[in-house]
Image: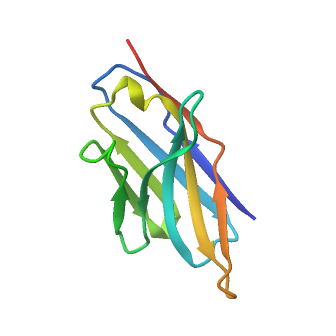
Amino acid sequence: QVQLVESGGGLVLPGGSLRLSCSASGSIFNIDHMAWYRQAPGKQREYVAAISPAGTTNYADSVKGRFAISTDNAKNTVWQQMNSLKPEDTAVYYCKILMYNPQSMPYAYWGQGTQITVST
């Protein structure tokens, strides 16, 4: 089993910044990537950003230039620096890890989510 623990959510003014962190523990092996998703009220969960162990990053168009994902492979931890936050960034943010076992079977685990509210 793998556990993901997120932190760093909260209330922030439009234009403000927050930094999320996610630490993975347990039976971790052969990580393909770690990623952030978010889900706003009444909407489906959507992809935000991902990073591979080699440091290759990918972002949704809606956050490019504002969010930055980074990782510490030794600590199985991923961060997301979020700048220039907008009210439409309000959502529950979830961390995800995708791994492959020795038989090349993919396993995905999710964190419990952390709320970010961007509002005056």
In the rendered image, the vertical position of residue 7 relative to residue 36, given as above or below: above
Residue reaching furthest to the front: 43
What colour scheme was applied to this rendering of the protein? Answer: rainbow
Residue reaching furthest to the bottom: 103
The x and y percentages for residue 84 are 27, 32
In the rendered image, the vertical position of residue 110 relative to residue 32, given as above or below: above
In the rendered image, the vertical position of residue 16 relative to residue 63, given as above or below: above
Quadrant in which residue 102 is drawn: bottom right
The residue at 45%/42% (across/down) is 20
The x and y percentages for residue 55 are 35, 69
In the rendered image, the quadrant that contains the C terminus is top left
Q: How many marks?
A: 0
The residue at 48%/70% (across/down) is 74
In the rendered image, the quadrant that contains the N terminus is bottom right
Report the side of 27 relative to 69 (left or right): right
The residue at 53%/51% (across/down) is 22
In the rendered image, the vertical position of residue 80 relative to residue 114, given as above or below: below
Residue reaching furthest to the top: 120
The x and y percentages for residue 63 are 33, 43
Residue reaching furthest to the right: 1
The x and y percentages for residue 92 are 56, 35
The residue at 52%/41% (across/down) is 38
